Image (cartoon, rainbow, N blue to C red):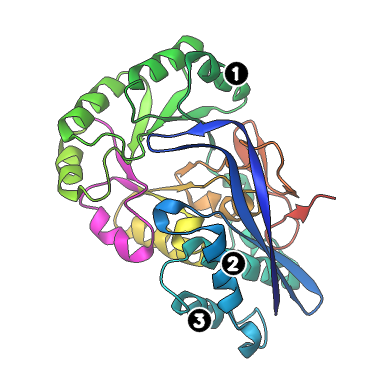
Amino acid sequence: MKLSWKQYDLKLKHTFRISRSARDIAPVIILEMVHDGITAYGEASPTKRYGESLETIGAFFASLDLSRFESPMQLEDILAYVDAAAPGNTSAKCAVDLALHDWVGKKLGVPLYQLWGLNPAKTAPCSFTIAIDSKEVVEQKVHEAAEFPILKVKLGLDNDEEMINTIRKVTDKVLYVDANEGWKDRNLALERIKWLKDQNVEFVEQPMPADQFDDLKWLRDRADLPLIADESVLRLSEVPRLAEAFDGINIKLMKCTGVREAMRMINTARALNMKVMMGCMIETAVGISAGAHLAPLLDYADLDGNVLVSNDPFDGVRNIKGRLSLNSQPGLGVTLRP
C-alpha cells in the first residue's frame, strides 16, 4: 500500500465564525492510497482544539508502515495498528480509515452504503449552517440556503437574539442551534434555551464547555429542548457517560477516527436511547461523502461542509433540496475534478 498526501486550501464563501474563532480558509489534507492498481482517497481536516495541524498530520502519515499488511482488506488489523501508532491524531487516522473503506468498496465494486446493507433513499434531511455574522450577511446566507428545509445556527456570543430574530424575519424553517460551548454560565444557558423554545428550535448543541460536565447535567434536567453533545464527544469510550448530560451525540468522522468507529458509536448511542447526529468540519466531498453513507442510520445530518466552500476539488455526494443524494459509484463515490 503506497500512501501520498497533498494539501488543499478550501476557500469559504463567507467568513466562518463561531463562538471561539473565525476563518476564511480551511486547509485540509487529501490522502491517496494506491494498491493493486486501485487508487483510493481519504481526508484529514485538522482542528487546533484537538491538537492537530497540517504538520502533525504529515508526520503521522510518514510514521506509518503499511507494508506489513498484505491488503487493505485487512481493515481491522490495519486500523488497530494505525490507532495504536500514536495518541490523538484523530483526523489523520480518519483519512486512513476513509481511504481503506474507499479501496475496499472499489475492489468489490459496490458503494459503502450497499456494503453495509443500507438504503440510500432513507438519508436523514441535511441542515445548512448559518455562522455568526452581521444582519445583512445572515439574511444573505438564509437566501442562499433556500433549498434546505433546516438551518443550523451558530450562537454563543452577545448577539444570539439578534441572529435568531434576523433569521425569523426571513424564514420560519426549523432551526438547530449550536452554541459551540459559548455559554459559560448555566443560568445564562438555561435562559437562552427557554427563549429558543418559542423560536421553532428543535435542539441545542453543546450549550456549555465540555469540561463543565456537572453544569451540563444540571442544565439537561431543566432544559425545555433536547441537548446534543459535540465538543463533549470524540470517541466511543465517551458515549455511555454522556447519556447523563445529553439527549444525543454529534458524531464527526474527523474526531472519532473514521466510519469504523462512527458505526460503533451509533450502535452504542441507540442502546442508550440517545439521538444520533452526524456533523462535519469544513471538508471536501471526500469526508462529506463518507459521512453521507451512514446517513440512513441518523436522526439528524449536518453534512454541508463542502457546500460552504467555493473550490471543492472533488465530486461526490450531492445535496438536493436538503437531502443527501448518494451515487452508485463504488467506495466513497468520489472523483477528483480535472
Say if residue 94 shows up in the picture.
Answer: no
Pinpoint residue 252: horizontal percent, then vertical percent.
47, 53
Mark closer to the chain start, 3 or 2: 2
Q: Nearer the viewer, mark 2 or mark 1?
A: 2
Please tell me whether mark 2 sits on a helix, a strand or a loop. Answer: helix
Pinpoint residue 241: horizontal percent, then vertical percent.
24, 58
Residue at which label 1 appears: 143
Mark closer to the chain start, 3 or 1: 3
Residue at which label 2 appears: 58
Q: CA distance from mark 3 to mark 1?
A: 47 Å
Q: Nearer the viewer, mark 3 or mark 2?
A: 2
- Type of amino acid at the residue the image marks with label 3: Tyr
Please tell me whether mark 1 sits on a helix, a strand or a loop. Answer: helix
| Residue 239, magenta (yes or no) | yes
Q: Residue furthest right?
A: 338
Residue at which label 3 appears: 81
Please tell me whether mark 3 sits on a helix, a strand or a loop. Answer: helix
Q: Quadrant of residue 225?
A: top left
| Residue 328, magenta (yes or no) | no
The magenta span reads: 224-248
